[in-house]
Image: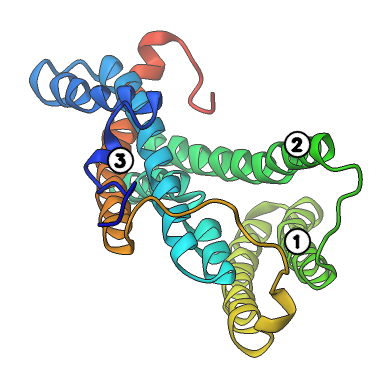
C-alpha cells in the first residue's frame, strides 16, 4: 500500500467522512428488526443506515474509476450510482410477487417501485444535472461539452421518453381489460428494447468508438485506495445495502400505518 493510501476498513472510519458516523445505525436496525421487533423504528433506522452505505458505494466506485479509464469509470458510476434504489426496488418487487398479484401488499409495493423510479429519474435529470450546471457555472465562465456524448445521451434519453409515453398513451386511448393487457405487453417490449440499446451503447462507447468519448482534461484527484480494496469495499457496502433494504421494505407497511404517512411518501 502506497503512501497516503487507506484500506477498505479505514474507508469506513468516521475520520475519513463524518457521514460514516451513521453506520452506527446498522446495529441499531438489527436490534429493532430482530430483537425488539419494533418495525417502525427498524424502518427509520434502516433508512438512515442506507445513506452512509450508498456513500461508500459511490466512494468505492470513484476509486475504481480513478484506477481505470474514464469510460470504464463513467460506466461504473452509471451502474452503481442508483444501486441503492435498484436494490430497494428489487426487494419491493419480490415482496409483491410473494404476496400475490391481487393482494393489497402487491399493489403497495408496485406503487413504491413506480415512485422510486420516478424519483430516481427526476433526481438525475433535474437535481443532479442542475447542480452540475450551477457548480460548473460558478467556476467556469464558459463550459464546453463533448458533442458526441451529448448526441448519444440525448438519443438514449429520447428513446427512454418514448418507451414511457407509448404505453401511457395506449392505456388512455384503449382502456379496459384489453388496454391493461396491451400495456403489459408494451412495457415488457420496451424493457427489452431499452436493455438492448444500453448494451449496444456500451459497445459503442467502450469498444468501437471509444476514441470519440476520450477527453483531453486530466484529473487532479489521486486514488487513495488500491483497486483490490475498492472492490472489497464496494462488495461489502452492496451486501449491507441489500440487508438494510430488505428490512426497510419488510417494515414499510407497518411503519407507514403507525406514523400515518402514505406508502408513496
- Visual colour scheme: rainbow
Of the pair 90 and 182, the residue shown nearer to us:
90
Query: Outermost residue toward the front?
Result: 3
Q: Mark 3 vs mark 1: which is more N-terminal?
A: 3
The N terminus, quarter of image:
bottom left
Residue at the spot of label 3: 11
Q: Nearer the viewer, mark 3 or mark 1?
A: 3
Of the pair 224 and 37, the residue shown nearer to us:
224
Is residue 213 rendered to the left or right of residue 40?
right
Mark carried by residue 157: 1
Residue 201, relative to residue 181: is it above or below?
A: below
Gap between marks 1 and 2 measured at Cα: 23 Å
Q: What SS does tag 1 mark?
A: helix
Mark carried by residue 193: none
Q: Nearer the viewer, mark 1 or mark 2?
A: 2
Of the pair 194 and 184, the residue shown nearer to us:
194
Query: Outermost residue toward the right?
Result: 142
Residue at 35 percent across and 18 percent down: it is 255
Q: What SS does tag 3 mark?
A: helix
Is residue 30 rendered to the left or right of residue 50?
left
Mark 3 neighbour class, 10 Å CA radius: few under 14, some 14 to 19, many 20 or more: many
Q: Quick check: marks 3 and 2 in contact, CB under 8 Å?
A: no
So how many labels did they put on this image?
3
Q: What SS does tag 2 mark?
A: helix
Amino acid at each position: 500500500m502506497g503512501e497516503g493510501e487507506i484500506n477498505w476498513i479505514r474507508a469506513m472510519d468516521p475520520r475519513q467522512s463524518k457521514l460514516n458516523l451513521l453506520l452506527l445505525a446498522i446495529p441499531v436496525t438489527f436490534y429493532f428488526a430482530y430483537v425488539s421487533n419494533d418495525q417502525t423504528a427498524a424502518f427509520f433506522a434502516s433508512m438512515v443506515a442506507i445513506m452512509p452505505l450508498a456513500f461508500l458505494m459511490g466512494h468505492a466506485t470513484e476509486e475504481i474509476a480513478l484506477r481505470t479509464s474514464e469510460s470504464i469509470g463513467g460506466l461504473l458510476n452509471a451502474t452503481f450510482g442508483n444501486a441503492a434504489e435498484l436494490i430497494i426496488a428489487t426487494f419491493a418487487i419480490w415482496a409483491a410477487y410473494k404476496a400475490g398479484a391481487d393482494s393489497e401488499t402487491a399493489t403497495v409495493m408496485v406503487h413504491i417501485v413506480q415512485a422510486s423510479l420516478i424519483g430516481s429519474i427526476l433526481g438525475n435529470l433535474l437535481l443532479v444535472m442542475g447542480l452540475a450546471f450551477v457548480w460548473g457555472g460558478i467556476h467556469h465562465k464558459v463550459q464546453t461539452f463533448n458533442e458526441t456524448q451529448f448526441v448519444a445521451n440525448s438519443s438514449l434519453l429520447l428513446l427512454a421518453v418514448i418507451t414511457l409515453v407509448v404505453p401511457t398513451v395506449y392505456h388512455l386511448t384503449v382502456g379496459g381489460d384489453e388496454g391493461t393487457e396491451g400495456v403489459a405487453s408494451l412495457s415488457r417490449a420496451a424493457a427489452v428494447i431499452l436493455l438492448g440499446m444500453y448494451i449496444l451503447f456500451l459497445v459503442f462507447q467502450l469498444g468501437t468508438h471509444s476514441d470519440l468519448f476520450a477527453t483531453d482534461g486530466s484529473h487532479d484527484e489521486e486514488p487513495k485506495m488500491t483497486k483490490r480494496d475498492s472492490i472489497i469495499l464496494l462488495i461489502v457496502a452492496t451486501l449491507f445495502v441489500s440487508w438494510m433494504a430488505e428490512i426497510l421494505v419488510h417494515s414499510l407497511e407497518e411503519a407507514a400505518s403507525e406514523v400515518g404517512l402514505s406508502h408513496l411518501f
